[in-house]
Amino acid sequence: MKALSVQLPYASWIADGSKPIETRTWATHYRGDILICAGKRIHPLTDSIDRDDYKPSRGKALCVANLVNVRPMVLGDQHAAKCRIYDGAFSWELEDVRRVDPFDVKGQLSLFNVDLWLIRYQTLKMYVDNRDCDFVIASNPDEAKLIWCMHYNCDPGLHPEKGFHEYTELNFEFAKSSTCLAGSVKMVSEWIAIRGRGWFASSQAV
C-alpha cells in the first residue's frame, strides 16, 4: 500500500478525523487508499499542544485514508488543513479514514510502499456514556469521548467525569437504521459520520 509520512500532531489529527486535508508542496496522480504514518518529530509550530500525548504515536502507522483529490490549496482549506495557506501548497483531500493497529514504520520522503500484511484495521464498536444516553461509534473508549467532545465543541479536559463503555445490544448495521430503541430512549435517527467514526444518537427522547 502507498504510504505517506506526516509530522505529529497532524498525523494524529488525520487519524481522528479532524484534519480531512493534508498539504504538500508537491502533487501526485495517485488516488486511493494511503497509509498515514506519524513522523518521529513534532511540528515546531504546534507548541501549544501537550507533546507527551503524542509520544506513543511517533514513528507509527496510524490509519488508512482514501486520497480522493489533489489540487492547489485555497484560503477556504485552512480550517480543514489546520494550517495557514502558503506558497506552492497543494491540498490532498482525504476521506473514509480507518484506524489501524499501530506498528513501526520508517518514514520516507514522497510516497513509499508498505507491505499490506502489516496492516490490521481496528474494529468499530458502539459505546455509550456513563449516563446511558449518548451513543458513539468508535474503536475505543478514548476515541468515543473525543468524538463526543468534537460534536459538542468542548475541551475533553473540562469533562473528566465523562466516560464511555462498550454497548453490545445493538450491532453496527442496526445503529445506522432510521430509528433505534435502547431501553426507554427512542434515539434520534440522524447518523453524523465523522471520517469513518460517528455519532449516532442521543439524549433527547422523542
Image: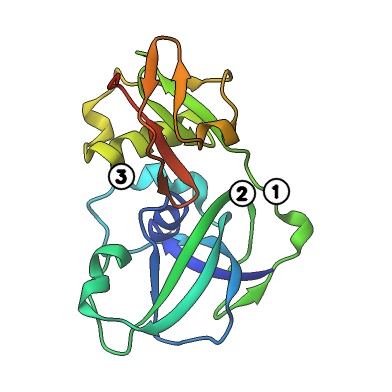
| Amino acid type, mark 3 | Asp
Instruction: Label 1, secondary structure: give it.
Output: loop
Residue 147 pos. (x, y %): 37, 39
Nearest to N terminus: mark 3 or mark 2: 3
Question: Horizontal placement of 75 versus 133: left or right?
Answer: left
Nearest to N terminus: mark 1 or mark 2: 2
At 59% across and 82% down in the image, what residue appears? 30
Instruction: Label 3, secondary structure: give it.
Output: loop
Name the image quarter holding residue 145.
top left
At 53% across and 20% down in the image, what residue appears? 167
Viewer-side residue, 73 vs 58: 73
At 55% across and 70% down in the image, what residue appears? 4
Residue where numbered disc 3 is placed: 50
Instruction: Label 2, secondary structure: give it.
Output: strand
Q: CA distance from mark 1 to mark 2?
A: 5 Å
Residue where numbered disc 1 is placed: 120
**Are there few (<14), some (14-19), or many (20+) residues within 10 Å of tag 1?**
few
Extreme top residue here? 184
Viewer-side residue, 102 vs 150: 150
Residue where numbered disc 2 is placed: 100
Q: Comparing marks 3 and 1, which lies closer to the viewer?
A: 1
Specify the quadrant that holds the C terminus: top left
Residue 204 pos. (x, y %): 27, 22
**Are there few (<14), some (14-19), or many (20+) residues within 10 Å of tag 3?**
few
Instruction: In the rendered view, tell whether residue 52 sits above or below residue 84.
Output: above
